[in-house]
Image (spheres, helix red, strand yellow):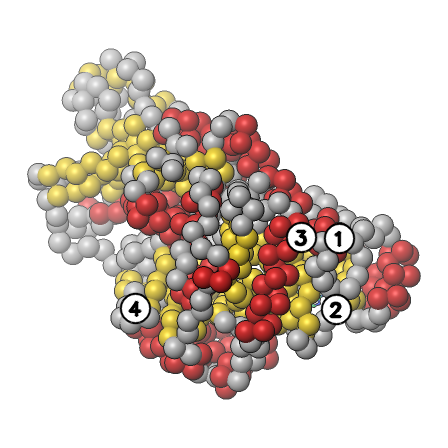
Amino acid sequence: MFSKVLVANRGEIAVRVIRALDEMGIASVAVYSEADRDAQHVRRAGEAYLLGPGPAAESYLNVDKLVEVIEAAGADAVHPGYGFLAENAAFAQRLEEAGITFIGPPASAIEAMGSKTRARELMRGAGVPIVPGTTEPVESVEDARGIAEEIGYPIAVKAAGGGGGKGFRVALEPDKLQEAFEGAAREGEKFFSDATVYLERYLPDPRHVEVQVLADKHGNVVHLGERDCSLQRRHQKLIEESPAPLVDAELRARIGAIATEAATAVGYHSAGTIEGLLQDGEYFFLEMNTRVQVEHCVTEETTGVDIVREQIRIAAGEELAFTQEDVRWHGHAIECRINAEDAAKNFAPAPGTITHYREPSGPGVRVDSGVLTGSEITPLYDPMVAKLIVWDADRERATRRMLRALEEFEIEGVRTLIPFHKAIMASEQWARGETCRDLIEDRDWLKRLAQPKPEPPAEDAAETVERTYAVEVSGRRFDVKVIGEAPAANGAGPAAAAGRPAPRRERKAASGGGGGGDVLASPLQGNVFKVLVEKGAQVEAGALICIIEAMKMENEITAHKAGTIEELPISEGAAVASGDTLAVIK
Ligand code: MV4
């Protein structure tokens, strides 16, 4: 078994993986961006390393930096979570070459399933039913016309590099084919640098039903049953449940067999999901997700299998500890995605600071989240704040339990989908097991979910004498507890000016990177908020030199040595880059 695993992700899924590692007695390593210094996944891990600035391209997607950290930390495996690098075959390959285990499928399976046309071709070859249509790319609108006549209208045009609905257009009649074709190609080019498209018959009213599979490296493959994820908006899943309302034991066995055959056909190992459409009792393969999914939890609740733990065991070369016959399903689980979005405003993202946060609990309630009071929901990443999962004996009771848990959930400071989920859970459409598409598109109904304007963050009322500072030494993060008198106000920051201490989370000590010389370099990019010394002044080591504001946080920069300020090339309001000289102290 691994001794140390790096979690190449953030938010709730990083916390979820760290929990599994803790339970397995495996050391965990978190990575984070400058926007996530205070994040829960950072605090929960055994050790944590800074990757870079907030934008994902410079942090969570920075493969060179990640590999550097993996080596510095001495991790022997990497769990990618979902999103970011989870389905990046080149990343999996690179780790493999470096002798680091990727906790996921082989790079070849990621690659095969990444191309939707190749996946369809493979699946058809393996005898897996696919939605009728092409398995070859369709070169031109002219070609598409002929093929569409054979398949029959309506036609779905999909981007080969797509998945999850990106690059998906529908042509209800021949007149609309060119527009659909060009739209799908354009979106494919934009998101996946691949304008290739293929055609499928458009199914008018299917259910989105997906099957969870687990495969080990010894040829054992099992399925853990299905999830219904039909309640989506613009291809973003909002509510998932297991079992699916329209799937009985016989159908479960049938689509389960399809899913395990599909996994076997691509030489799969790890956890994976076969996504499909269920229409009138017929099941069609759509695509395979070669990662652990957001909604894996509902399957964990109904089967009792810890999917993340199994992923880790499989990656370490262990055999599945159970067979298909051992898998038993109990009761009903529902998951609501608690996004920082405003359903009344077209599901607009609602970033901000969570000023108050209290999770529901009690029987059958599970919350997977990566936030606390004070956490910031930044527009840089996915707006999902938490996942609320409930379990109960049957669908009706699980629905009531979900309503109770939603009622208990307290989140202030940002608007969330809690009112939306309450309304759906209380609706007749949900009770009847319908997809609720009518509700999601009913603007008047959604408008009634309007929430009050969030309060601005409140500042801490009392001074504390014990403070925890985050320090980064050569990029590795340590939490340092400082006990004693609170730092003097110094006129530093608006809160201090108002005669109150600044809220804890806004005051972060950052040591200037001096490298032992005279130059005090900026450890981060930001704006000079305040300069607290003058040229020529004598300072002690540790004296406050300036405050740099970055990512809405105030960072106190202190002298790296005692001496005279010889140069001070900064002024209040000026922008500084990481590494810029803030002062020269001789
Ligand atoms: C389809 C479809 C109808 N016909 N493909 C693709 C991505 C995923 N988000 C849903 N996708 C669909 N693919 C064909 N050939 C309809 C959908 C679809 C859907 C399916 C079931 C339940 C809800 C849905 C919401 C939007 C799109």
Q: How far apart are labels 1 and 4 at the CA level?
A: 47 Å
Amino acid carrying mark 1 in the image? Gly
Nearest to the observer: residue 357 or residue 352: 357
Distance CA(mark 3)–CA(mark 1) = 21 Å
Q: Nearer the viewer, mark 3 or mark 1?
A: 1
Q: Which label belongs to residue 125?
A: 1
Q: Is residue 320 above or below residue 164?
A: above
**Amino acid type, residue under disc 3 in the picture:** Gly
* Residue ID for mark 3: 162
Q: Are marks 3 and 2 in contact (CB under 8 Å)?
A: no
Give the percent coordinates (x, y) of residue 198.
Answer: 78, 55
Foreground residue, 27 or 470?
Answer: 27
Q: Is residue 359 left or right of residue 481?
A: right
Q: Is the CB atom of the residue marked by disc 1 within 8 angstroms of ligand 1's nearest atom? A: no
Contact (Cβ within 8 Å) of mark 4 with mark 2: no
Report the amino acid beneath label 2. Answer: Tyr
Task: Say which quarter of the image contains residue 329.
Answer: bottom left
Sequence-wise, the earlier of marks 4 and 2 is 2
The residue wearing badge 2 is 202
Residue carrying label 4: 360
